């Protein structure tokens, strides 16, 4: 609760004197301890969140084999029960408090009982979660990123992009986890940029093939005729600067020439550009108040 109260003070500063209550600039995570326990601490956090009209984001992470039965379906059932329970308690405390339907199961590695948070089963759980929340007419959340390994390798790419595609396709109201990897406890700027690029890629894939606006090109094919070319065709001129095929600066399109740097190198270079000379979007007086707050909290001399 001390940490929560500290963040409330930070929120008051960020609100710029407009008051934190109802501002929706902060979202508290309220946890259920699986199976089916709302601790006194999390109950207190929930009450305080309702007082400030903050949207409640449930943290419900049952682990199959330790804090949940060892099957995919049973974790869906337990997650649903715990989420609906917390939603009901939230409305009892303060009717109308915003609430996001969300649960995030994992599976235990049975030798160590470590929670494996980003196995491929997570994709099934994410989709099931969104479908259940939508069946209740509630806003839903889904995780986008994440992989079981911290490495930038083929496994990370496969797990991360599959998670991204499932989350984007689920129709969730809120997408989270951009930049996450390795059981959701590792993040990097490069991962954020890469997963943001993946998000654009899956959005492109989900759009399918558009046939409107002359895209079928029947007239172009007739005009070119057998053996013709389309370098100066109307469709080529219309879409040559984008809008049809998937382009992204992080992806290497050098083909057989092997001229482009790998995606990770490009992401790192872009991060270096972003942080060089970075200016905070917060007004100067707000920045000063935050700096003063943390100096006081940490006991750092003002000089």
Image (cartoon, grey):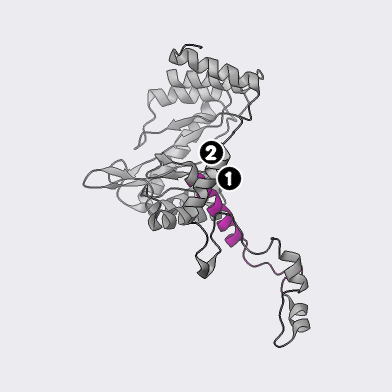
Residue 299 rendering spot, x and y as whole percentages:
44, 12
Residue nearer the viewer, 228 or 269:
269
**Residue 251 located within the stretch drawn in magenta:** no
Decide: marks 1, 2 in contact (CB < 8 A)? yes
Q: CA distance from mark 1 to mark 2?
A: 9 Å
Among all residues in the image, which is located at the extreme left? 111
Label 2: state its secondary structure.
loop
Residue, far bottom: 226
Q: Is residue 206 magenta?
A: yes
Q: List the residue tagged with mark 1.
A: 173
Quarter assignment of residue 227: bottom right
* 197 in relation to 13, above or below: below
- Dividing the picture into quadrants, the one containing residue 53 is top right
Binning the other alpha carbons within 10 Å of mark 1 as few (below 14), some (14 to 19) or many (20 upward) gives some
The location of residue 136, given as percent across then percent down, is: 55, 45
Disc 2: CA contacts within 10 A as few (<14), some (14-19) or many (>=20): some
Q: Residue shown at 53%/43% (left/top)? A: 271
For label 2, the residue is 100
Task: Point out residue 251 in the picture as x, y percentages from the top left corner.
Answer: 54, 58
Residue 178 visible, this angle: no
* Residue at image point 55% right, 65% down: 254
Q: Main secondary structure of the magenta part?
A: helix
Q: Position of residue 54 (x, y in %)?
A: 56, 28
- Earlier in the chain: of badge 1 and badge 2, it is 2
First to last magenta residue range: 191-216
Q: How many marks?
A: 2
Disc ID at residue 249: none
The structure residue drawn at horizontal position 39% and vertical position 23%, both measured from the top left corner, is: 40
Q: Identify the image quadrant of the N terminus.
A: top left
* Mark 1: secondary structure: loop
At a point 76% along the width and 74% down the height, the residue shown is 233
């Amino acid at each position: 609760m001390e940490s929560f109260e500290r963040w409330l003070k930070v929120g008051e500063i960020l609100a710029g004197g407009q008051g934190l209550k109802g501002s929706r600039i902060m979202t508290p995570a309220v946890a259920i301890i699986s199976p089916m326990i709302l601790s006194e601490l999390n109950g207190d956090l929930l009450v305080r969140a309702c007082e400030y009209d903050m949207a409640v984001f449930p943290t419900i992470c049952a682990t199959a084999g330790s804090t949940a039965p060892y099957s995919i379906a049973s974790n869906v059932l337990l997650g649903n029960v715990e989420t609906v329970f917390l939603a009901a308690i939230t409305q009892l405390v303060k009717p109308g408090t915003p609430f996001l339907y969300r649960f995030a199961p994992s599976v235990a590695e049975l030798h160590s009982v470590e929670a494996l948070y980003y196995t491929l089963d997570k994709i099934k759980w994410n989709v099931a979660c969104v479908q259940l929340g939508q069946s209740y007419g509630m806003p839903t959340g889904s995780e986008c990123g994440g992989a079981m390994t911290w490495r930038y390798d083929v496994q990370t790419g496969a797990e991360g992009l599959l998670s991204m595609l499932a989350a984007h396709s689920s129709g969730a109201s809120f997408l989270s986890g951009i930049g996450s990897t390795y059981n959701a406890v590792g993040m990097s700027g490069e991962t954020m940029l890469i997963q943001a690029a993946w998000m654009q890629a899956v959005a492109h894939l989900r759009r399918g093939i558009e046939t409107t606006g002359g895209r079928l090109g029947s007239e172009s094919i007739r005009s070119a005729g057998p053996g013709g070319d389309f370098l100066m065709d109307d469709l080529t001129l219309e879409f040559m600067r984008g809008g049809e095929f998937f382009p992204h600066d992080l992806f290497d399109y050098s083909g057989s020439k092997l001229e482009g740097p790998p995606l990770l190198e490009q992401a790192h270079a872009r991060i270096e550009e972003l942080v060089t000379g970075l200016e905070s979007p917060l007004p100067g007086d707000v920045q000063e108040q935050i700096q003063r707050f943390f100096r006081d909290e940490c006991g750092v001399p003002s000089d």
